[in-house]
Image (cartoon, rainbow, N blue to C red):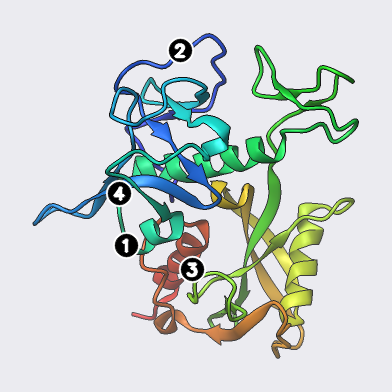
Amino acid sequence: MIQEIAPHRLANEFLPDVMPEAGQRVLYVRGQELAVRRVDVPGEPPAFELPRVGELGVAEEGLTFLFSLDGEPLWLAPDAGAAEVPEGFELVHNRALRLERRGPRELMFVAYTAVHLADWYAKSRFCGRCGHPMEHHGTLRAMACPSCGNMVFPRLNPAVIVCVRDPQRNKIVLTRYARGRYVPIDALIAGFVEIGETIEECVKREVREEVGLEVDNIQYYKSQPWGVAGDILSGYWCDVVGDPTLHMDASELGRAVWAGPDEIPGQGDDLSLTNEMMCLWRDTHRQG
């Protein structure tokens, strides 16, 4: 998955006293786009590079500390990434980088996580309690209101990824989002945890709402940060109970089918929790 970057390490501890140094990388983020330089070398996988402090046109003042990669601090360009993109770099949607299979993986994880933090900073400029401009907290990764004392920390959206199994028929439910929502690739049922419900209740509700099934035997698999949506994903297995007929919510989904092991191609890369779960089930349930 995208966060599996060993032997590299992304350290998300906030470092209040660190200062930018020449050669350290800077993230220019605008929505879901990042300033990158595509790198295409014959015989090598497609890659990309990020701007660095000290390069021509790269901001050196007003940078916001993001996190560290292998001990190197990385920075967010001024004004939440609205600063002019340096010469030689272009704004590229993070989805395009993924579809182009560009690496290295540790920079993809950096890009996804930077998008998450840049979005939070952009949305935390004013106090939600009194409307006063917010300021960076001196020692914490937080925005603080100097007027009323309100403090805001980065937001995480808890969400579930659900693999619904039919053990008797050796199939799982595959879905695709409705037209115009995300990339048209096979996925699993997914949704956000609502206030006042447990994650297990969320699993049952999302399955019921999206495909009209009842499930039990809910089992946790693993989790994943998914920065481009600000999510923390939890993956679950579960089994259908009763009638397996699918009743798809067409406002959410464009496709919902029961699929056997030989009908699951996967998503084309190994970055997502969804793809790992689909392919793991496929590979362990093939006959012969």
**Residue 268 appears at what percent x and percent y?**
36, 68
Q: Nearer the viewer, mark 3 or mark 4?
A: 4
Q: Quick one: 201 or 11, which is closer to the camera? A: 11
Residue ID at (57%, 39%)? 118
Give the label on residue 35, or none: none
192 with respect to 256 (left or right): right
Give the label on residue 103, or none: 4
**Residue 254 appears at what percent x and percent y?**
61, 84
Dots 3, 1 in contact, CB < 8 A: no
Q: Earlier in the sequence, mark 3 or mark 4?
A: 4
Q: Which residue is mark 3?
A: 278
Query: Looking at the rendering, which quadrant does residue 189 occupy?
Result: bottom right
Q: What separation in Å lies between label 3 and label 4 (alpha carbons)? A: 23 Å
The amino acid type of the residue labelled 2 equals Met
Q: Nearer the viewer, mark 2 or mark 4?
A: 2
Query: Looking at the rendering, which quadrant does residue 207 occupy?
Result: bottom right
Q: What separation in Å lies between label 3 and label 2 (alpha carbons)? A: 43 Å
